[in-house]
Amino acid sequence: QVQLVESGGGLVQAGGSLRLSCTASGSIFSIYSMGWYRQAPGKQRELVANIISGGITNYADSVKGRFTISRDNAKNTVYLQMNSLKPEDTAVYYCKVVLGTRARVADYWGQGTQVTVSS
């Protein structure tokens, strides 16, 4: 069984910073990618950033230059450092991990953490 635990969300003023973290635990054989998505009210869930094997990163255009994704392989943890936050970054942020267990390779999602940026 696999669990993802997220932390780090909260309320911050525009221009401020937050750091999200997500740790995967359980019967994990291999992690293929780790990433962050977000969903604002009335909008579809969208990719914010991800990091795949080899350390290759991808970012949504809207966060390039402001957000940084990183990964600690020893801890099975992915981080999202968010700087220069804007009100339009307000959303529930979800961690997504693609990993393999004994039985299969599958996507696993965290429970979500609220990020609210006030103007």
Image (cartoon, helix red, strand yellow):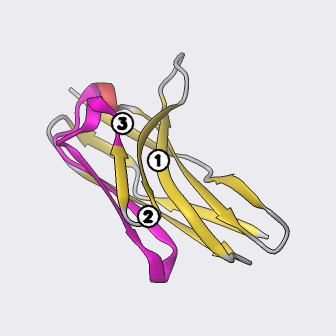
| Type of amino acid under label 1 | Trp
How many residues crowd around disc 3 within 10 Å: few (fewer than 14), some, or many (20 or more)? many
**Near-viewer residue (3 or 28):** 28
- For the residues labelled 1 and 2, the Cα–Cα distance comes to 9 Å
- For the residues labelled 3 and 1, the Cα–Cα distance comes to 16 Å
Question: Residue 12 is drawn in which quadrant?
Answer: top left
- For the residues labelled 3 and 2, the Cα–Cα distance comes to 20 Å
Q: On the image, numbered disc 2 is attached to which residue? A: 78
Outermost residue to the bottom: 74
Residue range corresponding to the magenta coloring: 59-87
Q: Position of residue 7 (x, y in %)?
A: 47, 60
Identify the mark nearer the N-term, 3 or 2.
2
Q: On the image, numbered disc 1 is attached to which residue? A: 36
Lateral position of residue 23 relative to residue 62, left or right: right
Identify the mark nearer the N-term, 1 or 2.
1
**Near-viewer residue (23 or 56):** 56
How many residues crowd around disc 1 within 10 Å: few (fewer than 14), some, or many (20 or more)? many
Q: Position of residue 90 (x, y in %)?
A: 37, 31
**Residue 48 lies in the magenta stretch:** no
Q: On the image, numbered disc 3 is attached to which residue? A: 116
- Dividing the image into 4 quarters, which one contains the C terminus? top left
- Dividing the image into 4 quarters, which one contains the N terminus? bottom right
Q: Residue at x 39, y 41 (%)?
A: 115
Q: Residue at x 68, y 52 (%)?
A: 107
For the residues bearing labels 1 and 2, Cβ distance under 8 angstroms? yes
Say which element carries label 1: strand
Q: Residue at x 37, y 47 (%)?
A: 10
| Type of amino acid under label 2 | Val
Location of residue 72 with respect to 17 vertically, above or below? below
Q: Position of residue 99 (x, y in %)?
A: 65, 63
**Residue 76 lies in the magenta stretch:** yes
